[in-house]
Amino acid sequence: MSDTIRSALPIAIIGAGPIGLAAAAHLVNRGYAITLFEAGTSIAANLHSYRHVQLFSPWQYNIDPIAAELLQQETGWKWPESTALPTAGAVIDQYLLPLSALRSIAPFLRVNAKVLAVARQGFDKVKTQGRQGAPFVLRVQMSEAVEEFLASAVIDASGTWSQPSPMGAHGLPALGELENANAISYGMPDVTGRDRTKYAGKKVLVVGAGHSAIGSLLALASLAEQGSHTRVVWAVRGHDISRAFGGGDADALPARGALGMRLHKFIADRRVEVHIGFKTHAITQNNSGLTVIAADASLPHITDVDHIIVATGSRPDHSLSRELRTQHDPWLESTLQLAPLIDPNEHSCGSVRAHGHRELAHPEPGFYAIGAKSYGRAPNFLMATGYEQARSVVAAIAGDIVAADNLQLTLPQTGVCAGGPLADDGSGAGGCCAPIVSAPAKTAGSCCSPGAQPEQISAGCADRTKANSQVSSPRSCCG
Ligand SMILES: Cc1cc2nc3c(=O)[nH]c(=O)nc-3n(C[C@H](O)[C@H](O)[C@H](O)COP(=O)(O)OP(=O)(O)OC[C@H]3O[C@@H](n4cnc5c(N)ncnc54)[C@H](O)[C@@H]3O)c2cc1C
């Protein structure tokens, strides 16, 4: 680490998730003063909300190399077993908490500090002359009051997880979604753990086709297995659910392949009622619970639902940089230059090439969004990619353009990144938050949607004959 701590204003980092903390490590390693703002009561609040979830990438891809060096130097910290798959909680406990507690970082971390807005001091967005010389000002909701802090540069690593996408297929909340918010959860609730009482013995609908939806379905199915009379319903916007089953025995990540096979078995055993091609239009409530109505009026309603888990992805909140000159892709809402590299209509995370400060720059010099936030709505973000973003951006801020341009991302050819393009529901079934997809698992069974046509039955539902014979009596097929 450089001995010279620069005397200029600190560099502000918004969000102490894995990527914000990596940026902090890179900055202190280069001798910069930092201020790290975290909205949660502790670091990594988003990961904490799904701390029970086993990640699909092993430790070797979940740790920033410079952060590891600092940890080793300051505390003698040791790398976890590189090929083991941690839970999100283990990433917090074994890596991020020790990192945030380093004496080079801890004094500069402010929790319960939600950044509300960033601007140039004395300059609104329109004013150009002298703008570049002005410091950034961050307006921050602290626990007691709103305060303002100055910074020489700003790295926004605030993620997207706290802005879940709604249930409505058109991207707006479904009619009745807001009114019934008390019976709807977003993301990945801890179904078998701390949120168990909300789900045990209930009829629960899961909406989405990505990693989060699959995880919740499996957790609910285990709850049902434990004799709690929990009923599990799965609604998917697309027509092919085979992607969700992963590669089975052939999956590059065995743990993930096993998840897909378990889900396939639950469906084959008819312990999960499946509705494909189901784009939610409206939710109504009566004495027996919620009724969920599809946009396609020919599909039956999903009735008597007690609780809904919506796992349809998340989106960035760009309101905090509204007074800055930023450029975002019109539909991904990612940083503009990044969009062609990550478009989930064409790319899984496996085909996203390494990128750095050039793709992450905005017209506002000194302001960068990195991490999941930089990807906007694209679900194919990986921590390993974010660590390389942090390295490149910090090098660029330091004026070390050679290092900033020397992109060093190495991801496995298979495994972490074997998904295909975006799922129909935008939740990233083919992204990195999805089970790996290769060949559909070849176990016997059937799955269908009430009202589905034979040709719509997923290729992943191996026993087509059985499925086809049952579409005329859809309730008996899936219900
Ligand atoms: C269920 C699930 C499983 C995943 N599994 C993997 C995996 O196996 N491997 C992998 O590489 N990636 C995985 N991902 C993706 C992973 O979440 C991201 O890679 C990672 O968490 C993104 O890190 P981040 O630091 O960019 O954002 P986040 O982890 O979302 O962190 C953002 C931080 O900013 C804080 N914040 C937000 N707004 C503000 C504000 N206004 N002011 C101050 N602080 C703020 C938040 O509280 C949070 O602590 C998974 C994601 C999900 C949802």
Image (spheres, grey):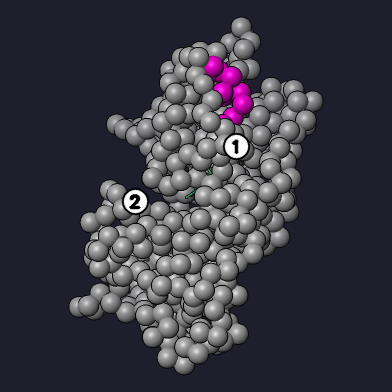
Tell me, yes or no, if residue 131 can be seen here. no
Residue at x 71% of width, y 37% of height: 410
Query: Given contact means CB atoms under 8 Å apart, are the residues at marks 2 and 1 in contact?
Result: no
Q: Which residue is disc 2 drawn over? A: 190
Tell me where residue 459 appears, x and y as whole percent. 60, 75
Q: In the rendered structure, does residue 420 fall within the stretch colored magenta?
A: no
Q: Residue placed farthest to the bottom in the image?
A: 472
Residue drawn at 38 percent across, 85 percent down: 475
Residue 478 to residue 334: above or below = below
Give the percent coordinates (x, y) of residue 442.
Answer: 58, 69
**Real-space CA distance between mark 2 and mark 1, rounded to the nearest whole angstrom:** 24 Å
Element type at mark 1: helix
Vertical comparison of 146 with 335: above or below: above
Q: Which residue is tagged 1?
A: 61
Say left or right for 42 vs 431: left
Front residue of 253 and 408: 253
Up the image or down, 315 lies above or below 399; here it is below
Return the residue nearer the eye: 80 or 423: 80
Boundaries of the magenta span = 63-72
